[in-house]
Amino acid sequence: MTTSHNMCNDHGGFLLDDLLSQFSSSSESAIINNPYQSTFVTCNIIAMLCFIISSFTGNFSQVDKLWSIVPAMYAWMCVTDTRTALMAFLATLWSVRLTYNFYRRGGYNGLPFGGEEDYRWEILRRGTLGGWWTLLTNKFILGVFNLVFISLFQNLLLLYIASPSVVAWSMAMKRTHCDNDEGVQNLSSLNALDGIAATIFLFALCIECMADNQQLRFQNKKHAINSVSGTFASATKSIMAKSAENKDLVDGFCQSGLFAIVRKPNYAAEQLIWISYYFFSVAASAPATWPHSQSQGTVLWVNWSMGGFILLCLLFQGSGWLTEQISTSKYPAYRNYQRRVPLYMPKITTLWNLLVGNGHEKGGKVQ
């Protein structure tokens, strides 16, 4: 199969058979630097290193150290035009912010293999949640879990959420090498859909940053108060309990600000970031005049890279459930918080009150 045939098909890398065709001939990468192959090989090397290191050190957060880094790396491996460069730039903004947040929480202490481990891994190892989770107390099953889910699945997911860059690369190559293609002349390096995707991406990134900063300030204040013991500490907490502003500290968890709108605003924003990132791959199929002239070409709204953000959202459903289970077991007031505030999707009434300026907080709740 020749390069021109792979590049100049009707879909430009959009359908699953187009994806598979990129791996059908090793000679392609000698003609054009093929990110389909290079990113996949890199991903698997990283996954194996994470498994080996985590197995020897007992620290299962090796993937966590790379979570904020490798998607941006994959995006830069796909840069070939203005759109892919914009995607790589936005992915880098996300990467720098998340890497810094992980660093200030102690995630990179004791590098290269140490650092803080996500507390949820230890809870799973101990079988604290009961039920099927107790299977992970078996060292062999835990090792399989580490290989299949923690190391392989999570690394492949990180490649998958960045794969819209690979699709955009395909379309850029089509514009460059397929001048005789009837529809290629209508494609553009950037269009209005790119602007929409970039705007949503930056909005979600700001929300994520605000939520992480709010959570960090709360945790620092909480730990400072909890470090004080004796009569003074009891008196302080008694006074705080009478103030609605300090309800978070009394209950033990953050439930004001963004956390009064949804229980996991940072998780919600992270999902929105990668949903918006997918739409760059859709924009790659849109004509230059979209949406004003649909007659110049058909926008392909669905392509194989959509699976990346879908799997990420499903992962957040699972990790969100796990975090919620832990929180309800630690904080008696958390069940009431669950009844008041949704997990990821804010209530329409809450958004409306904020929009018209009627939102105010009462007992950690936006009215």
Image (spheres, rainbow, N blue to C red):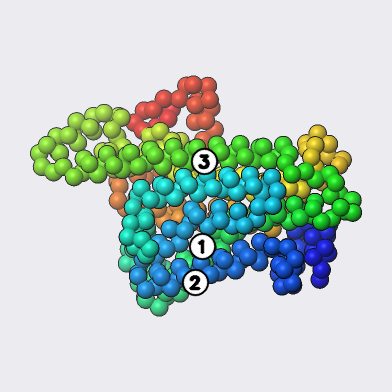
For label 3, the SS is helix
| Between 3 and 127, the one nearer to me in the picture | 3
Q: Quadrant of residue 130?
A: bottom left
Residue 162 place in picture, x, y as percent: 60, 55
Q: Which mark is residue 154?
A: 1
Say which quadrant the C terminus sits in.
top left
Circle 2 residue: 48
For label 2, the SS is helix
**Position of 254 compared to 348: left or right?**
left
Mark 2–mark 3 contact, CB under 8 Å?
A: no
| Between 144 and 244, the one nearer to me in the picture | 144
Residue 246 place in picture, x, y as percent: 28, 33
Circle 3 residue: 205
Question: Spatial distance from mark 2 to mark 1, Cα to Cα?
Answer: 12 Å
Instruction: Please state which amino acid type lies under the numbered disc 1.
Output: Gln
Question: Spatial distance from mark 3 to mark 1, Cα to Cα?
Answer: 21 Å
For label 1, the SS is helix
